[in-house]
Amino acid sequence: MANYKEAPLATQPKTLDPAEYFNLSPDYRRAEEKRAALRAQLKRQYLEQLNNPHRKALIEDPALTRWTYARTNNNYFRPTAKTSLIGGLFGVLPLFVLYVVFKTDRDKREAKIKAGTYERPYKLST
Amino acid sequence: MLKVLIPTIMLFPTIWLTSPKWLWTTTTAHSLLIASISLTWLKWTSETGWTSSNMYLAKGPLLTPLLVLTCWLLPLMILASQNHINPEPISRERLYITLLALLQTFLIMAFGATEIIMFYIMFEATLIPTLIIITRWGNQTERLNAGTYFLFYTLAGSLPLLVALLLLQQSTGTLSMLVLQYSQPLQLNSWGHMFWWAGCLIAFLVKMPLYGVHLWLPKAHVEAPVAGSMVLAAVLLKLGGYGMMRMMVMLDPLSKELAYPFIILALWGIIMTGSICLRQTDLKSLIAYSSVSHMGLVAGGILIQTPWGFSGAIILMIAHGLVSSALFCLANTAYERTHSRTMILARGLQVIFPLTAVWWFIANLANLALPPLPNLMGELMIITTLFNWSPWTILLTGLGTLITAGYSLYMFLMSQRGPTPNHIMGLQPFHTREHLLMTLHLIPVILLVTKPELMWGWCY
């Protein structure tokens, strides 16, 4: 491994660079060891739950909890120009547009009924 | 009427005096007996609109299907709650069933009321047991928020109704529906009268719910325990519809102009809430929004005041009550097993629960309004009468039907099909009780295909 030379057109991956693991400061090393210990603890906790024959429940995944919380609570909505435009376009404007459409249609029909020119398309006795 | 009301009141001593070993059996059996007695109401012998043995409680072709639905639902609620209430101390179990029975009593008196004030008092009274069920027995901390939204939305809507009713009493001298249907059409031509008109209807529109004021519904349905969700979806929403149908009789000349905003909100709401359903990750939330969508169609049908609209509204209310309640029961079975309402956690269930997959299938097909089920019949009548009212509505209702089919299929495919994740393999099998619950929900829907006259109301 010490005489590794990179391929002529490829870059050396960072993990194979000797400088990465020979020039570390002791502080960095201690921090890295602590992080590795935490990771090992978490992995041990997960594997204990996974291989427990009496386990009936789902193994709780905090990422899933965060995801469902984010999806179901709309705390992330902020009224900006874009969201207000979308809200107005889909939530407020259609109401007015529909009002205009229905009112003119019904008024035209009412005028035709009053004038006697409305032909009833269906014969409904009840 | 009394032959059902007195057994329902006798349900309270039954609950508190049976021994703990027999509590669930006796209450379920008692409420099933009440449900069977209530089925006798379906035999319609008179030709007139109402039959009443006394002046205060009556039956009519509009009320009878709703009353039977209410009575039918109580044993189903008790069956559904058995599992999650069992670990609690015995007096709390009794309290829970008491709340359900109290709700039942108030609902029977509300639907059967002939005086509008009695209907109003019972309408408000049903809020209390529902609030207690949601906030005490719900499962997440959001239940407090949900209870608050539920209570205050409905109260804020119904206080104007009280004022409007008192004004009506002042001007016509009576509030009995039997008399008011023959009264002169009221002269309604000033702003004050318009506010009175709105006051009469807002309470029921909030309860239905109409799209703009529907926020309480997803919260309340999701946070409530299963019996709470069932009764909310199946019956309490129909209180709003029934109230609207009764009030529209007297509100006539103004409704032609003033109903437009509400019809438009209802129709646009079908599309908006249907689209929200397609983006939901929470199963109960999806079913709750689909309830808003169907009720939007009902509200539209009632507000245009045509015979077909009323018939379609009643049919859709009954069918939606049964099917929505069935879907909530199914969602609860998934919740009790995985303790989560997230849809992606409970997927691929068909492989391990094949019979339940059949119930999911039928319930979802009913929800998407498959012919010949009554859901379709109701929806079709309302869509047709809306088309007659104004041909442009077909764009909204047609798109709404398409989106309904989309999210119902999404719900089915997400929960049943696909690869079964590993954590699902170890889930408890289905109890007979749960299968019984589902059959008791879905068999009436299928039987109603054969005799829809039971539900048509008086306008056929």
Image: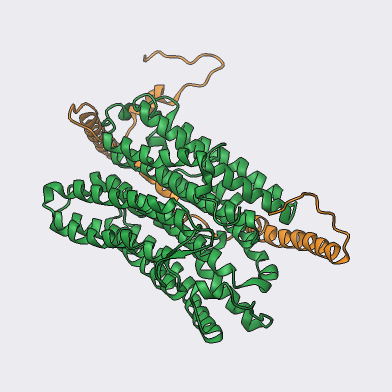
Task: Specify whether residue B230 is in view.
Answer: no
Instruction: Give the quadrant of residue B211.
Output: bottom right
Residue B121 lies, with reference to residue B229, above or below; the image says: below
Query: In the image shown, does B93 or B36 lie closer to the viewer?
Result: B36
Q: How is the image coloured?
A: by chain
Query: In the image shown, does B446 or B290 lie closer to the viewer?
Result: B446
Query: What x and y, as percent, mark residue B213?
Result: 52, 63
Q: Which color has been applied to chain A in this rendered view?
A: orange
Residue B366 lies, with reference to residue B353, above or below; the image says: below
Q: Quadrant of the N terminus of chain A?
A: top left
Residue shown at the point (65%, 71%) measured from the top left: B252
Task: Specify whether residue B18 is in view.
Answer: yes
Q: Which chain is green?
A: B
Outermost residue toward the bottom in this view: B170
Query: What x and y, as percent, mark residue B432?
Result: 27, 34
Residue B356 lies left or right of residue B288; in this view the side is left
Query: In the image shown, does B15 or A84 lie closer to the viewer?
Result: B15
Query: What x and y, as percent, mark residue B6?
Result: 28, 62
Residue B357 lies left or right of residue A49; in this view the side is right
Residue B47 lies left or right of residue B421; in this view the side is right
Q: Quadrant of the C terminus of chain A?
A: bottom right
- Please give the count of numbered marks on the rendered protein: 0
Residue shown at the point (40%, 21%) measured from the top left: A16
Query: In the image shown, does B34 or B220 lie closer to the viewer?
Result: B34
Query: What x and y, as percent, mark residue B456?
Result: 55, 51
Residue B170 lies, with reference to residue B290, above or below; the image says: below
